[in-house]
Image (cartoon, rainbow, N blue to C red):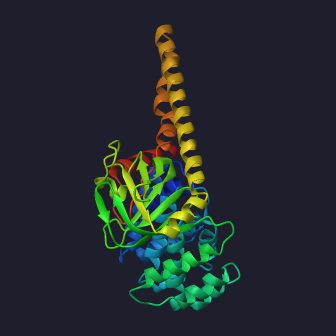
Amino acid sequence: GGAMGALVDLFDFALVRQAVSVEVQIDVAELFNFFSDADATKDAIGERFMEPLADLVARPQQHFALHRELCSNLIALVKCSKANKLRLPCYSPVVQALVTTTDFFLQLQCVELLYRVSRQHPRLLDKVQAELPEMLFTGIRALPNSADLFDRMCDLVTAWNRTRTPRLVMDFAVEHVDVADERYTAKTTVFFSPKIFMLLLPNTAANNVSVEYTTIRSVKMRTSDGGLCIRLREPPASIADKLEIGSEGKDCIVLKFTDAARQEFRDSKIRQWIYEMTEQARQASSNSAAKMLLSTGRKSLDVAAGGSSGGRTSARNSGGAGGDRSADGKGVAYHSHNHRVASATSMVLASQQIASQD
């Protein structure tokens, strides 16, 4: 019908062709998650979108939050739907995402998806056995349908990451975590990869805190208690209400490692990863500022010359591609999987852009 046709157009324009900003792409993926999770629509959505969703999950060089939201759609689609579990003739794209990503949370999602499908249809997992590392293949088969499934998946993925060379997902035991003035005393684990780190906060609303290195202001190992103090330029969405950016002591996350984890962290390449990403962000910010100054200078010349065509060019530059690049340069906060309907502004923007292509 007309509604499905509109969703197809939106999916193609925003997610396949990526003709909107990363932030809008994530909003669109969240919108689809709303339909993927609803009993009344999930089978129809699965029939039309499961294969392209799987292909997008495997597409490299996307923002980590977008990858997660796309995979969340697939998980929602196969939950309580026998038909959707059989929609994909082969789960190779999901396996490809699992073995190539360095995002621990996305690895967990891929394992969960393969587990949910293989419980009822073991042959679907057999089809990708050659592509899956043996540890993961046997581990997924052995996962229990019990309350500790999440913990068991974490153990499996962590153990597998430790066998990989080079190690690009590193886990560290943490005795407690301070988020500004609030302390979380439950022992947990933090996972560092080349672009982000992810912290599990058990028994909290923000059970998954993911921080991009490009949003980090500084990293320092404190001599007083050995805590790793990470000051932020931008807060992750899941704990934004707890941080005061720019206020020293209230704009940081402090990780209190165990003694063994602290030494392993010191010996690792993680600080080099963080430095490289923050330097890239600084350079991008400098380039953006230089372009803005250049654009401002051109506008001044246009006004002084009184040229009408120059004025039109300046207006186009300030609201067109240049504006898009500036928006894309900002860090995109990861939205937790709460299936919220995407923002009205993002949807209006996307629909207007689709209409302009017709």
Looking at the picture, does residue 214 appear above or below residue 79? Answer: above
Residue occupying the point 46% across, 25% down: 315
Where residue 136 sits, quadrant-wise, is bottom right
Nearer to us in this view, 210 or 351: 210
Residue occupying the point 34% across, 44% down: 248
Looking at the picture, does residue 63 appear above or below residue 145? Answer: above
The furthest residue to the front: 224
The furthest residue to the right: 130
Looking at the picture, does residue 190 appear above or below residue 140? Answer: above
Q: Is residue 342 visible?
A: no
Q: Position of residue 119 (x, y in %)?
A: 51, 90
Residue occupying the point 47% across, 46% down: 218
Q: Position of residue 284 (x, y in %)?
A: 55, 38
Looking at the picture, does residue 335 appear above or below residue 147? Answer: above
The furthest residue to the top: 305
Q: Position of residue 249 (x, y in %)?
A: 33, 48
Which part of the image, by quadrant, shows the N terminus?
Answer: bottom left
